[in-house]
Image (tube, grey):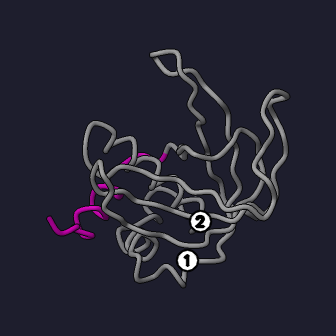
Amino acid sequence: MAFDLKKLVKQVAAASADNRSGYIRPGEGTLKIKSVLIKEGHKGTNFITEFEVVSAKQTDPAIAPNVVGSTVAIILPLIGERTQSSMNSIRGLVEAATNSKGEECSEEVISGFCDPKNSDTVAGTLVKFQAVQVKTKKGGDFTRVSFSPAE
């Protein structure tokens, strides 16, 4: 099945930004976008953003933050039960990276960010992050990430 970018753009545009994601260690700091990808995986299609860690400050005494200069990624499923959560996370990242909110974060802005063809244009964009570890309903650990514009 071919991926439908227009459908993704409409879903993200209709989502509410919650600025959360995963796969980044608890802490706070600045990330630089390296690439935006849409890839098929063993569980379906994923929206992936790779970052370089520019700065990271430890906020949880039990967990070391990501190492400055390392590469981290968020991987968000575009199908399945977590789709709406993924759309909200993508919207939050787009708003932070483009410094746009609400109506300013139009389908055109979202398309410009989410289309892998524009990855070179998006690369180098800085965003601030704050990541905290929370417990899942099943008692496991999950890192919730909030993004904000780098000023």
The residue shown at (42%, 50%) is: 76
Residue 35 % position (x, y): 54, 72
The residue shown at (46%, 72%) is: 113
The residue shown at (58%, 37%) is: 144
> What is the span of residues highlighted in magenta in the rendered image?
1-17
Is the N terminus in the top left, top right, bottom left or bottom right quadrant?
bottom left
Q: Nearer the viewer, residue 89 or 71?
A: 71
Q: Which residue is mark 2?
A: 97
Asked if residue 16 lies in the magenta stretch, the reply is yes
Is residue 149 found left or right of 103 in the rendered image? right
Q: Gap between marks 1 and 2, in whole Å?
A: 8 Å
Question: For mark 1, does the 10 Å Cα neighbourhood hold few (<14), some (14 to 19), or many (20 or more) residues?
Answer: many
Mark 1 and 2 residues: CB-CB less than 8 Å, in contact? yes
Residue 149, image quadrant? bottom right
Mark 1 / mark 2, whichever is N-terminal: 2
Q: Nearer the viewer, mark 1 or mark 2?
A: 1
Residue 65 % position (x, y): 78, 44
Q: Nearer the viewer, residue 146 or 43?
A: 43
Is residue 127 found left or right of 10 in the rendered image? right
Q: Which residue is mark 1?
A: 122
Question: For mark 2, does the 10 Å Cα neighbourhood hold few (<14), some (14 to 19), or many (20 or more) residues?
Answer: many
